[in-house]
Image (spheres, rainbow, N blue to C red):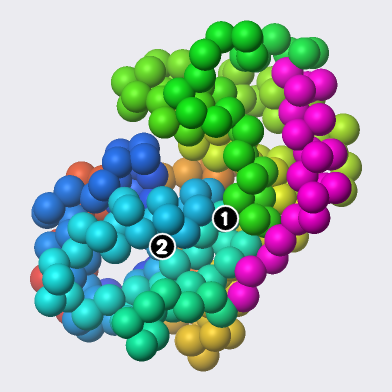
């Protein structure tokens, strides 16, 4: 991991979402909303996730007080494959990478082939919503379905063994793509080079803020984690374990600033 600079408050903090700002697929809690409202009064923040824009709005932005200035919030959905900014009272796309219908079909077929090899999921059993979801620049496979209850998601693959086996089976099939473990039950697939590191570089360029003056906060910065890729950008990082840990870290930042 890259150590943060001496200055407690960077020019921009980039947050992972699930298990960093909120529990998986859940809205941020009131304390987090209050803290982030204080933060955006002083600096810019960004949120990145494997989810679509609508998911980030639902989990984060919609939980802010109505009087909050959300123009200092930037959203990097689909693992950094897109960037949205709030202008003229609406969310505007700065850029978005997309997969073609042929590429989406290729990835969907590969998921089924890899699943047959690993017996990860029984597709004949009912899921909580879609298992395979097209997210513009990303295809996501959610073993239990997109709307699975949190307790079931947490208990399905606590050691990452199931997701790792499926990922390892997908990699040789999808040689033109990056296959990574996403959420607690999820595998995310994008074109090579389209990831959270890509998003951070594009955000830095758009905001004209050097990466060394930014900071990344996430719960998966360790080896094999879905935040690990950001380290290659040189962005200073802060590892956290859960939203409570993140809240404590932000409280410390505010006190020191």
- Residue under the image location 48 percent in, 78 percent down: 92
Query: Residue tagged by mark 2?
Result: 47
Give the percent coordinates (x, y) of residue 86: 38, 79
Question: Residue 98: within the magenta?
Answer: yes
| Magenta stretch, overall SS | helix
Nearer-N-terminus badge (2/1) = 2
CA separation in Å, label 2 and label 1: 10 Å
The kind of secondary structure element at disc 1 is: helix
Give the percent coordinates (x, y) of residue 212: 49, 78
- Residue under the image location 38 percent in, 18 percent down: 152
Q: Tell me if residue 115 can be seen.
A: yes
Residue 10 lies in what quarter of the image?
A: bottom left
Q: Tell me if residue 160 can be seen.
A: no
Question: Residue 43: within the magenta?
Answer: no
Q: Is residue 87 left or right of residue 176?
A: left
Give the percent coordinates (x, y) of residue 27: 26, 47
Q: Is residue 38 left or right of residue 234?
A: left
Q: The C terminus appears in which quarter of the rendering?
A: bottom left
How would you rate the neighbour count of disc 1 (Cα within 10 Å): few for under 14, some for 14-19, many for 20 or more? many
- Residue under the image location 52 percent in, 13 percent down: 126
Give the percent coordinates (x, y) of residue 40: 24, 76
- Residue under the image location 80 percent in, 34 percent down: 171
The kind of secondary structure element at disc 2 is: strand
Residues rendered magenta in the picture:
95-115
Query: Residue tagged by mark 1?
Result: 79
| Residue 204, numbered label | none
Residue in the foreground of this view, choosing between 87 and 210: 87
How would you rate the neighbour count of disc 2 (Cα within 10 Å): few for under 14, some for 14-19, many for 20 or more? many
Residue in the foreground of this view, choosing between 56 and 157: 56
Q: Is residue 175 above or below residue 40?
A: above
Q: Is residue 178 above or below residue 161?
A: below
């Amino acid at each position: 991991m890259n150590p943060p600079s001496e200055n407690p408050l960077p020019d921009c903090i980039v947050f992972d979402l699930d298990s960093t700002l909120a529990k998986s697929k859940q809205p941020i809690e009131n304390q987090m909303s209050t803290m982030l409202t204080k933060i955006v009064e002083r600096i810019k923040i960004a949120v990145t996730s494997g989810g679509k824009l609508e998911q980030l709005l639902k989990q984060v932005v919609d939980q802010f007080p109505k009087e909050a200035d959300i123009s200092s919030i930037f959203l990097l959905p689909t693992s950094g494959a897109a960037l949205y900014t709030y202008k003229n009272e609406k969310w505007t796309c700065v850029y978005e990478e997309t997969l073609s219908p042929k590429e989406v079909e290729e990835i969907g077929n590969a998921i089924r082939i890899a699943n047959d090899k690993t017996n990860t999921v029984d597709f004949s059993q009912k899921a909580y919503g879609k298992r395979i979801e097209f997210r513009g620049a990303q295809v996501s496979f959610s073993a239990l379905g997109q709307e699975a209850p949190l307790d079931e998601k947490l208990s399905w693959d606590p050691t990452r063994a199931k997701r790792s086996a499926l990922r390892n089976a997908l990699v040789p099939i999808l040689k033109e793509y990056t296959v990574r473990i996403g959420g607690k039950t999820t595998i995310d697939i994008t074109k090579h080079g389209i990831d959270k590191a890509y998003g951070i570089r594009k955000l830095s360029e758009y905001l004209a803020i050097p990466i060394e003056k930014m900071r990344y906060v996430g719960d998966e910065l360790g080896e094999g984690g879905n935040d690990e890729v950001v380290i290659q950008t040189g962005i200073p990082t802060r590892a956290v374990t859960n939203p409570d840990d993140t809240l404590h870290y932000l409280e410390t930042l505010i006190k020191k600033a």
